[in-house]
Amino acid sequence: MKILIVDDFSTMRRIIKNLLRDLGFSNTQEADDGMTALPMLKSGDFDFLVTDWNMPGMTGIDLLKAVRADDKLSSLPVLMVTAEAKRDQIIEAAQAGVNGYVVKPFTAQALKEKIEKIFERVDG
Amino acid sequence: MESQSQLHNNEEFIAELQDCAKLLIEKLQGDQYQEASQLIHSMVEVRDRHIFQAVGKLTRGLHNAIVNFHVDADLEKEPPTIDGSDVRDASDRLSYVIDLTQKAADKTMDMVEASAPIAMNLGQEASSLRDEWARLKRREMTPDEFRQLYKRMDEFLGQMDTGTEQLNKNLQDIILEQGFQDLTGQVLKRVIGLIGEVERDLVSLVRIAGQVEEITGLTSDADKLVEAAAERKMEAEGPQIHAVARDDVVSGQDEVDDLLSSLGF
């Protein structure tokens, strides 16, 4: 499974990459903003998108909306991993079609559970 | 202090006007129109003098507040270029904090990634040797196999020695890397101080602006303020530091999950 990790902090990208590798997912790529991520997704054959919310160019929520609006990408599973914890935003993400929402700081267990849940739903 | 002297001036001003007004009525009642007219003239002068004094004070106050901001800028340019200021200083320090924490995180993760294989290899070899040792205890081993085990054990003890030495060094380096917190803490304290100063200076300016509004009779645009407040409600805020105290914010993954499932997601 090919995964794209999007976050403007390289430390966080590295942490998520490490955790994914521990879970058995070693085919990962990275982008530092929604702006750079979108073309990668469009031309890239990714199976899963993990994205932050706050990014300077294009935010995670706008990236999510762009993905859902694109014919080729509309059913791409998307997990948001973000520090944003306002109710309004969680609801906005859910209504925009996010498949999972993990708040920072998070545990390896939380990440694992959300990923398993997403792919359970996709397969089933 | 300043406001008390302002109050005193206001009282004096009002008292002068009242005296003139009384005198004006007397003159009018006594049909002394020329003197009445002169009185009106001097009342206008009193009012003008009062305004000039107040404006003079405000100008001085404004000048002081601006000087306190320590802004080193070229105001001729459009937009003005800022070469140095307390806020610029605070921003630089915050960038430094980002830089330092980034480096510490990277170095720590490097140490962890270097240590993981060492620990894994030692573990695997220990596990395998344990199986061999169990066979030996059950007397299931041939002399040849025993000689191999003997050699392997010897090598393993050597690996343990160098391996654990490296692990201990890595662990210690990780501890040392956490020293960033001391440096960033000091820098952040300074930034908190700078922000406090800027806030105080801004409050001075706001007070002066309020006094200007009083004199010129301007009122604030209440509608615009309400609109701005509503917009702020929907904005992203970054990590929550007072999550427990706020009711528009969730604290922790469990509350996120509860919220989503309560809405059917």
Image (tube, coloured by chain):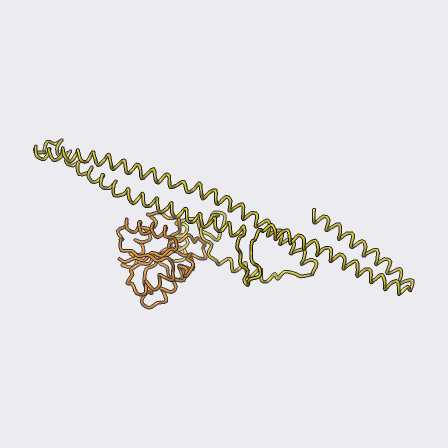
Chain colours: A orange, B yellow
Residue A1 image-quadrant placement: bottom left
| B6 with respect to B256 (left or right) | right
Percent x, y for residue B240?
Answer: 46, 50
| B104 with respect to B10 (left or right) | left
Determine if residue B107 is in view.
yes
| B58 with respect to B225 (left or right) | right
Q: Taking B165 as reference, is A107 above or below it? A: below
Percent x, y for residue A75?
Answer: 32, 63
| Figure quadrant of the C terminus of chain B | bottom left
Q: Residue at x 55, y 60 (%)?
A: B80
Q: Residue at x 37, y 39 (%)?
A: B176
Between residue B186 and residue B23, name the one nearer to us.
B186
Percent x, y for residue B6?
Answer: 72, 51
Q: Residue at x 37, y 41 (%)?
A: B177
Kindly give the residue lying farthest to the right in the view shown.
Answer: B30
| A34 with respect to B88 (left or right) | left
Between residue B19 and residue B138, name the one nearer to us.
B19
Kindly give the residue lying farthest to the bottom in the view shown.
Answer: A71
Percent x, y for residue A119?
Answer: 29, 56
Determine if residue A120 is in view.
no
Q: Taking B72 as reference, is B172 above or below it? A: above
